[in-house]
Image (cartoon, rainbow, N blue to C red):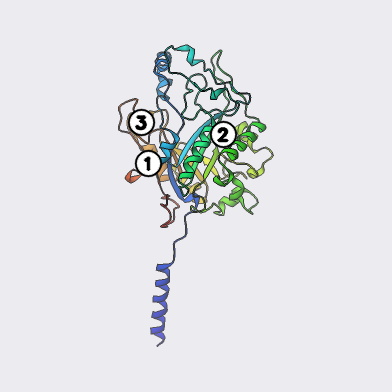
Amino acid sequence: MKFAFFLGAVAAGALGAATQRAPEPLLNQIQVIGSHNSYKQAIAPQLFAMLQKADSVSMSKIDYEHATLTEQLDKGLRALEIDVYADTQGGKYAHPKGLDLAPGQPPFDPTGLMKQPGFKVLHIQDLDYRSNAPTFKLALQELEKWSATHPTHQPVFITMNAKSEAMNRPGMTVPEPFTAAVFDALDKEILDYLGADKVVMPDQVRGKYPTLEAAVLHRNWPTLRAAQGKFVFVLDEVGEKRATYLQGHPSLQGRVLFANAEPGTPEAAIHIMNNAKQDQAAIRRLVEKGYIIRSRADSDTREARANDKSSFEAAAQSGAQIISTDYYMPSTHFQSPYAISFAGGTYFRLNPVNGALSATANRK
């Protein structure tokens, strides 16, 4: 009787284990592919030809373009990059110098959007300035509209550069600096046009932990289900600009964007390591600890021209949760079959390093 009871207990325990529901994956237990400079249109052919004659190497690095933000999200991409320039008075980028360098270009800003105050979205002032979302307000409104029609979409990561560097060319537009007030305005614009309910913010991840990093190391990321229909913004800056964003906001208290913060600092949660071939082991260790890492599959069109997927493969194997590419579709600017996706042509999957099995992981 005792032996039979023991077998019954083992069988019941095994059945319970078999039917026990797997834990829901957390936000850091997924892996997504997204685009780099997601807003970018091609430089007008007339201007590109002129600039290429002057510097063919540099121009080859920016010879690409993207579909609209909506088209990319519809395709399944779950990471975007949006670069912003401050324009508090309006009009600073309304007439790029490049328009005067080469005649015959298509019209630029026919409705006068660039004359209005507010953040502008473009790649390089005066030279690579055509954008599918010329103002940050328009980009946010487009994201909000898409999200409203896909209310249970997988979370979307948005990396952002705060562009303020002047070019080493006389007569070119000098961008405004990103002061604390400008960063405050950036936070406010996200909340005004997208809505706080649509954003996963550092305060939510930190919770009751003393620092954001402590929360991350204790796996306090929201579940994938809780992050459905939301966006995660990341400031891709270091040095003075990162310090300015953090000033007065220890552990990013009250901030909207996560920072590209070094592991070991109170603000560390999302970190950018773009060379997965070099840092594959280091990325994997950080992913296992709980951090979210962003890496790149390609840059400057090099990998695409050579049809070399080794950087993508290294990033995918490292467990980096965000993998950025300029080529989720093959280039229309040069001949190459290079295009990045996971198996089956997807751009979202459970993380191969720290992902947990769950039937909810592939919910749209």
Front: mark 1 or 3: 3
The residue at which mark 1 appears reads as 313
Q: Residues within 10 Å of mark 2 (few under 14, many from 20)?
A: some
Q: Nearer the viewer, residue 310 or 161?
A: 161
Which three-letter amino acid code belongs to the residue tagged 3? Ala
Report x, y in % for residue 124.
50, 23
Seen from the viewer's position, the closer of residues 23 and 91 is 91
Q: Position of residue 19 (x, y in %)?
A: 41, 68
How crowded pointer 3 is (Cα within 10 Å; few <14, some 14-19, many 20+) is rated as many
Q: Earlier in the sequence, mark 2 or mark 1?
A: 2
Element carrying mark 3: helix
Quickly name the residue at label 3: 304
Q: Is residue 184 above or below residue 177?
A: below
Whether residue 282 is visible here, answered yes or no, is no
Quadrant in the rendering for residue 334: top left
The extreme bottom residue here reads 1
Which secondary structure lies at badge 2? Answer: loop
- Taking the spot 55% from the left edge, 33% from the top edge, the residue there is 137
Q: Which residue in the structure is indicated by mark 2?
A: 237
Residue 297 locus on image (x, y percent): 41, 36
Quadrant the N terminus occupies:
bottom left
Q: At 54% from the left edge and 32% from the top edge, which residue is drawn?
A: 136
Q: Residue at x 55, y 30 (%)?
A: 84
Q: Nearer the viewer, residue 18 or 93?
A: 93
